[in-house]
Image (cartoon, grey):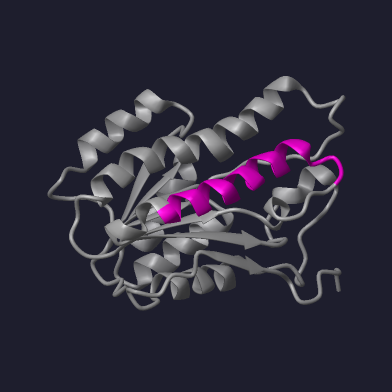
Amino acid sequence: MDLHNKVAVLTGASSGLGSALAKALVQEGVVVYGLARNRDRLTQLREQLGTNFHPVRMNLADRQMLSHWVEDTFSLDYGPDILINNAGVGGFEKIDEMQPDYWLQMVDVNLNGTYFITAQLAALMKQKQGHQHIVNIGSILGTVARSEGAAYCATKFAISGFSEALFKELRFYQIKVTCVNPGSIATDFFASSGITKHAHMLQPDELADTILYVLKTPDNMLINELTVRPLNPKAP
């Protein structure tokens, strides 16, 4: 895909991999609608990236709020070419100590939110000419589980299955679907389990460049699943 002048919807855009993806996409000439709940960080990104970045304060688990935004923003004449489902929350606790609300939050954001926005935007993407691409950010913990990660692993294993079914459903509409499963990324994501970020983790900007490579692949080439790990995961 030639990315110049394409339109992308990016969830979880305000920090970490999301903000790195927003920067990388804008540098390629993509118009980016960046969705997140943190208005201040979205505003800062707008100031940094310019008018090709459109900040959208959004709770993906609020289906009505999301529907209104999609209807107000897109139409059959103007719709997204790229959807990157990056938003996610996670935590690691013993199953008998985890609060039910924490489990439900992970399911709502990681799984339900991905479904809500994908279902609405896929309907528009199927009507477009040319190729489009949906990228779901999964996790290495969607391929192999870890102790005290039942909730997070459950949602990410679900994203893997969701992505595989989706690519088989949408491929004949010229819509690619890719599930990217990163290992540990140098953000504060794992702080709740006592793991602090360090230089040997995957760097957000480098992972963003890898995802752009996937987006730029020839139209009839599909990388439907990609696992990316640190070569040496131990802290220096």
- Residue 56: image quadrant is top left
**Residue 57 image point, x, y percent:** 40, 37
Q: Residue at x 72, y 44 (%)?
A: 153
Taking the image as shown, residue 13 lies to the left or right of residue 53, namely right
* Residue 44 visible somewhere in the drawing: no
| Rendered position, 80 above or below 25 | above
Quarter holding the N terminus is bottom left
Along the viewing direction, whichever of 189 and 159 lies nearer the viewer: 159
Secondary structure character of the magenta stretch overall: helix
Q: Residue at x 87, y 25 (%)?
A: 96
Along the viewing direction, whichever of 49 and 222 lies nearer the viewer: 222
| Magenta residues (range) | 147-168
**Residue 119 image point, x, y percent:** 37, 39
Quarter holding the C terminus is bottom right
Q: Residue at x 83, y 35 (%)?
A: 93
**Residue 234 image point, x, y percent:** 86, 69
- Residue 158: image quadrant is top right
